[in-house]
Image (cartoon, rainbow, N blue to C red):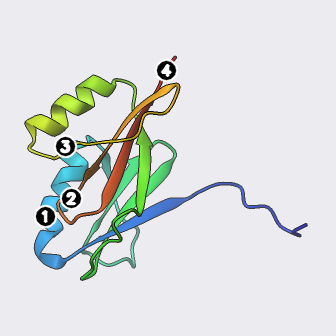
Amino acid sequence: MSDFTIRGLDHVTVTTPEELETEVLEFYESTLGLRRLDKPAGTRSSGGWFAVGDLELRVSLDSHNPPPKAHFAVTVDDFEVVVGRMRASGFHIEQARPMPGRHRFFTRDPAGNRIEIVSYDR
């Protein structure tokens, strides 16, 4: 038993090489429609922070090769609208193994970070 309690998840950070920074920030803001946040004073000017419900997604610069299976998942209300937007924007949709009570797929941002899109049946 622990003498403290983890109350929740605060943020998720993904990385991108410097040469893809603009494309990656545009992907999260325009393609996924996330609201960009002002970064606090004292943080680096590069990268960006986005609101994802009550959490934050942070994009940091780093030369990297993301692990092929590592990912984060977001939930959406209108699954088909998101599928259409991803296809219209030229992003690949990787079908996920079916799971009861939900629709889902994987995609990757321009830096190769894997993202799962999930919509739960109501």
Circle 4/circle 3 CB separation < 8 Å: no
Q: Which mark is residue 31?
A: 3
Decide which of tag 1 and tag 3 comes sooner along the chain. Answer: 1
Q: CA distance from mark 3 to mark 2?
A: 10 Å
Q: Which residue is mark 2?
A: 25
Q: Which residue is mark 1?
A: 22
Which mark is in front, 2 or 4? 4
Q: CA distance from mark 2 to mark 1?
A: 5 Å
Q: CA distance from mark 1 to mark 3?
A: 13 Å
In the figure, residue 38 lies in which quadrant? bottom left
Amino acid at the residue labelled 4: Asp
SS type, badge 1: helix
Amino acid at the residue labelled 1: Thr
Circle 2/circle 1 CB separation < 8 Å: yes
Q: Which mark is residue 121?
A: 4
Residue drawn at (8%, 44%) of the image: 90
Relative to 2, does residue 118 appear above or below in the rendering?
above
Q: Nearer the viewer, residue 20 or 116?
A: 116
Locate the N terminus and report the quarter of the image it occupies. Answer: bottom right
Category of crowding for the residue at label 1, using alpha-carbon neighbours closer than 10 angstroms: few (below 14), some (14–19), many (at least 20): some
Q: Nearer the viewer, residue 38 or 23?
A: 23
Decide which of tag 2 and tag 4 comes sooner along the chain. Answer: 2
Category of crowding for the residue at label 4, using alpha-carbon neighbours closer than 10 angstroms: few (below 14), some (14–19), many (at least 20): few
